[in-house]
Image (cartoon, grey):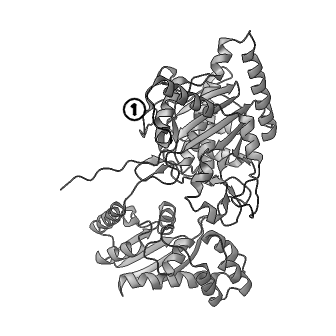
């Protein structure tokens, strides 16, 4: 029997941004050349847990110092063996520093522009120092790496002559040295995907102090954190560490009052930083409700915001930097690539979203997923479990575990979007009780009869959902709004405006149970739990 090739994991756009920001800070604060790769923490960042953060080494394509407090770094997003619409695109991060943590984002950008102008004047004078020249020059080795990684995206024939390579290198230098102020001006321009549609301008996102303190608490609990880069090893071939997961054996330390201090350094520095994220060219802007990001903000999801902030906090604490850090995220091909996603339908205009609830892209073919599901069920059965707990993902599984704390961990199986397959597989293994846990969107799809609930192949019929809600007692006005809802989350937000909501949720959960019963027959016993996105338990149906 032929061996099945192990599929290679990739990393998310959120991890790409976090890595690029960390690399830029190493260059700015460590006065170093561009690192070949950086180690970043991976979500989730939960201060209530005591687990060790997973870490990932992300290769850096190229980076250039524009001035003493402004740097540009690029990362090529790698989707692994399960590529999506953003696989292979350039994620470009502009980082600007200010020593005043109370400085506003616009003030910081202005400072960067002024410093960039001064740097240009110095470089143009005869008294320019070698240090200032090296600070603004791109790293040649990294630009060559960037050209090699970006080569499949070029439409021009590959020329191996010296002239051809020189032209390619100049093009890369031009891209890597894009002016910060020009990009900030693009960021300020209104975005729209339609000449007739609405126009929106992205608002800067200031990372809340509470979030930074929470991230600091998470990082302080780690037994080890990445040490500062070894400059002698920065220019190694990034392919040697590509996709390698690392856990540094060293601890970051700070010198405070002449003494070395390793306790709570991240929490300490969290209160001394101001981090602002800007959605630049190619990053979408949210224009409709129903998403985890507020209308008007750049489409940078909550977990990537934490991941980027954690990466910044790690590096700044390591170098002892206190002040303001402004980060502009740009994706040169973002608007074009967004057309191959659901963003236009969801009302996300002008580019892609920065995503990633776990930081990596775990590839699964349908066959591999199904094999994983049945394997988990077989283990549960062999351990004597009579009840099997099925969830559609990591978060819903965690909520089920909290609801059934007495159950063994081996009895919980994540089944993703394979509703019919997993229910039938559990029935075939003679479990006496199947417990299903999911969020609102998956529950509605199950109730509407979808056998496989992935967004690419199963869409919610919002007209049908509105009819069911009206039948369960929802007001006509709210039902009409649900019929034109943008997402399942949006529909639930509309429903929650009603005072008498519980009968409606109970009805929809019961409908999902009846649909699930078609895949199990009369046995075994079935229970369906509905959870909210914020972790609340909304409804349960049992028979």
Name the image quarter holding residue 167.
Answer: top right
Q: Position of residue 408 (x, y in %)?
A: 39, 64
Q: Residue at x 39, y 32 (%)?
A: 240
Q: Position of residue 487 (x, y in %)?
A: 62, 70
Closer-to-camera residue (280/478): 280
Identify the image quadrant of the C terminus: bottom left
Left or right: residue 153 compared with residue 116: left
Residue 528, compared with residue 198, is above or below; it is: below
Q: Residue at x 46, y 51 (%)?
A: 361
Closer-to-camera residue (468/312): 468
Identify the image quadrant of the N terminus: bottom left
Does the rendering let one see residue 272?
A: no
- What residue is disc 1 on? 240
Instruction: Please identify the residue farthest to the left as the structure is shown.
Output: 1
Residue 133, compared with residue 17, is above or below; it is: above
Left or right: residue 296 compared with residue 471: right
Q: Position of residue 505 (x, y in %)?
A: 60, 80
Name the image quarter holding residue 255.
Answer: top right
Q: Position of residue 309 (x, y in %)?
A: 63, 43
Left or right: residue 350 compared with residue 163: right
Name the image quarter holding residue 422.
Answer: bottom left
Disc 1 element: helix
Instruction: Please identify the residue farthest to the top as the structure is shown.
Output: 127
């Amino acid at each position: 029997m032929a061996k099945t090739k192990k599929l290679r994991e990739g990393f998310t756009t959120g991890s790409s941004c976090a890595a690029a920001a960390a690399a830029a800070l190493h260059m700015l604060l460590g006065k170093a050349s561009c690192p070949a790769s950086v180690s970043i923490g991976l979500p989730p960042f939960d201060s209530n847990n005591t687990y060790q953060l997973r870490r990932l080494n992300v290769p850096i394509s190229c980076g250039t110092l524009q001035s003493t407090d402004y740097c540009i770094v690029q990362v090529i997003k790698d989707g692994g063996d399960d590529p999506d619409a953003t696989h292979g695109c350039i994620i470009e991060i502009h980082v600007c520093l200010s020593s005043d943590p109370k400085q506003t984002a616009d003030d910081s950008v202005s400072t960067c522009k002024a410093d960039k102008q001064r740097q240009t004047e110095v470089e143009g004078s005869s008294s320019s120092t070698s240090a200032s020249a090296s600070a603004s020059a791109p790293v040649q080795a990294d630009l060559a790496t960037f050209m090699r990684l970006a080569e499949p995206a070029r439409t021009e024939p590959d020329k191996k002559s010296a002239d051809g390579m020189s032209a390619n290198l100049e093009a890369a230098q031009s891209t890597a040295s894009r002016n910060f102020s020009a990009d900030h001006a693009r960021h300020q321009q209104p975005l729209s995907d339609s000449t007739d549609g609405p126009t929106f301008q992205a608002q800067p996102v200031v990372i809340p102090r509470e979030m930074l303190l929470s991230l600091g608490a998470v990082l302080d609990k780690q037994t080890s954190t990445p040490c500062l880069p070894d400059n002698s090893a920065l220019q190694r071939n990034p392919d040697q560490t590509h996709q390698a997961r690392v856990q540094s054996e060293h601890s970051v330390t700070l010198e405070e009052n002449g003494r070395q201090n390793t306790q709570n350094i991240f929490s300490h520095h969290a209160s001394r930083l101001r981090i602002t994220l800007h959605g630049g060219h190619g990053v979408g802007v949210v224009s409709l409700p129903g998403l985890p990001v507020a209308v008007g903000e750049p489409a940078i999801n909550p977990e990537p915001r934490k991941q980027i902030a954690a990466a910044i906090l790690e590096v700044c604490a390591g170098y002892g930097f206190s002040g303001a850090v402004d980060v502009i995220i740009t994706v040169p091909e973002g608007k074009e690539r967004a057309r191959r996603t659901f963003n236009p339908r969801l009302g996300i205009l002008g580019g892609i979203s920065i995503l990633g609830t776990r930081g990596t892209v775990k590839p699964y073919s349908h066959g591999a997923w199904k094999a994983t599901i049945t394997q988990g069920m077989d283990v549960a059965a062999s351990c004597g479990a009579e009840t099997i707990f099925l969830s559609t993902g990591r978060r819903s599984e965690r909520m089920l575990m909290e609801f059934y704390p007495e159950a063994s961990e081996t009895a919980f199986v994540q089944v993703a979007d394979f509703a019919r397959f997993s229910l039938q597989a559990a029935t075939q293994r003679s479990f006496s009780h199947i417990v299903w846990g999911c969020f609102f969107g998956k529950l509605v799809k199950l109730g509407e009869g979808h056998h496989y609930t992935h967004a690419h192949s199963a869409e919610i019929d919002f007209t049908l959902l509105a009819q069911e809600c009206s039948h369960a007692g929802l007001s006509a006005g709210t039902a009409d709004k649900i019929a034109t809802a943008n997402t399942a989350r949006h529909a639930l937000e509309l429903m929650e405006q009603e005072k008498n909501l519980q009968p409606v949720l109970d009805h929809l959960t019961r409908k999902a149970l009846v649909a699930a019963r078609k895949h199990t027959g009369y046995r075994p016993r079935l229970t369906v739990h509905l959870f909210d996105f914020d972790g609340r338990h909304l409804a349960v149906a049992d028979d």
